[in-house]
Image (spheres, grey):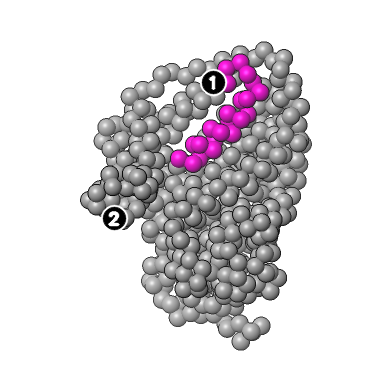
Amino acid sequence: MILGLSMPALVSLLGIVVVVAISMYNEDLNVGIVAIAFAILIGAIFAGIPAAKVMQFWPIDLFMILAGVTFLFGIAITNGTMDKVTANAIRLAGGNTAVIPFIVFLLIAIITTIGPGNIATVTLMAPVAMAIAGRIGLNAFLMTLLVVGAANGAAFSPIAPTGIISQFFVTRMAPELTSLGTPLGDLDTIAWRIYLDCQVAQLIVNMGGFFALGGLAWMARQKHATLSIDDVAPKPEPFTAPQWMTVAAVAMLVLLVILPGLSITKPLFPPVVMNVIGNGKTANVGALAFVLSTILLVLKAGDSTKAVLSMPWSVIIMVGGMGILIEIMDKAGGLGALVGMIAVVSDPTTVTGVLGFVTGILSAYSSSSGVIMPMFLPLVPGLVKAVGGDPVAMISSINVGSHMVDTSPLSLFGAICLACAAANEDKGRLFRKLIVWGFSMSVVGALLCYVFFGVLAL
């Protein structure tokens, strides 16, 4: 025993610290691969778990859902459907340039919610949004707040990759929480509550920053703007038949995920249909996505090679690899040790702020959904047992805290927006503003989580 910990627990705890440190130091290295290697070594040498058994801890259910959803939206992105949807939506502003930033915000939130997720949506929309900001004279920093805030707020949709990751861990912890006397209740309802928590948090902070740091002044100047909408978003070509089929497939995905869970429409879906699209009781977004994707490919509405290349394989591997390491860490006792450390400085109210702060600091240097969420979400049952409190509040705090700092140029989203800023922007100054804002969000996110989820128990 060292520091009150068994050797397997201590080594597994050191292992996760080293892996997270590597992810913070070298962003080009896929930490999922490193996590698998550490899991094999720790499991085989210190926990008595053979390498072949360690490899079986790969979260296959999560992998299949992520692969299906990202492939379907890979088709939508590569066949031009999303580009035309974006252009037509922005043109709704007409001659009123003051509403364009809010159309961009709403469009990003909707696109992220229906399935592509925050990574794909920011990659798709940031170049468009930053170019528009240059054309309408909007500060690139303010547009970055809207782009990242909208994408991260909607990222926890149960049918988007980040929301799928969150819901995967929620589903896994549900039986343990029930045994502790704190059942989560209906998991679909919980998923949408977490989505709403994150959406409201991002909306308050990023929209508040937009208005307070120059957005209101910019809007006032737009009263005399004479810019044509054709100069901002040229009218796109009409949708082709394959693109209309893709729109129909995405709409079908959303409806088949939502409708079977509603009491009024549930009778419309017999058991045989539910077996095809899910587990017999609820729809599985991954299964639906694979079926709909195959229909599109058979109808020649998409290119499978391009769609596969567009999938976020890096994040998928990170999540899977970290999942294996966390499983080994749990079996070795390291997870319990980490819970104990957080419990020492927390109570049922402050634990939300502590989780928001720690995940925010670490996420500033590491992947929010690929590293931080898989590391901290499994701690929730242990924290509920150790300090008490609302498990959903803890889950939302982890999710909000880890994603509030993503405007930093050290993160993927901040870096994309910085790279796509208009030529007339001072990128050195923009870098400094984004890094100050990003790091300050670790504190702001912690306070928000403490007040909203701890004190007010929203």
Examine the residues drawn in magenta and state their main secondary structure.
helix
Residue 194 image label: none
* First to last magenta residue range: 92-114
Check residue 94 for magenta coloring: yes
Callout 1 amino acid: Arg
Secondary structure of residue under mark 1: helix
Q: Position of residue 210 (x, y in %)?
A: 70, 35
State the residue in front, 66 or 171.
Answer: 171
**What quarter of the picture does the N terminus occupy?**
bottom right
Residue for badge 2: 280
Look at 64% across and 21% down and name the residue there: 97
Check residue 333 for magenta coloring: no
User: Crowding near pointer 1: few (<14 within 10 Å), some, many (20+)?
Assistant: some
Q: Is residue 409 visible?
A: no
Question: Which numbered disc, 2 or 1, marks the residue closer to the eye?
Answer: 2
Q: Position of residue 276 (x, y in %)?
A: 26, 50
In the rendered structure, the answer to whether residue 239 lies left or right of residue 143 reads: left
Callout 2 amino acid: Gly
Look at 65% across and 14% down and name the residue there: 227
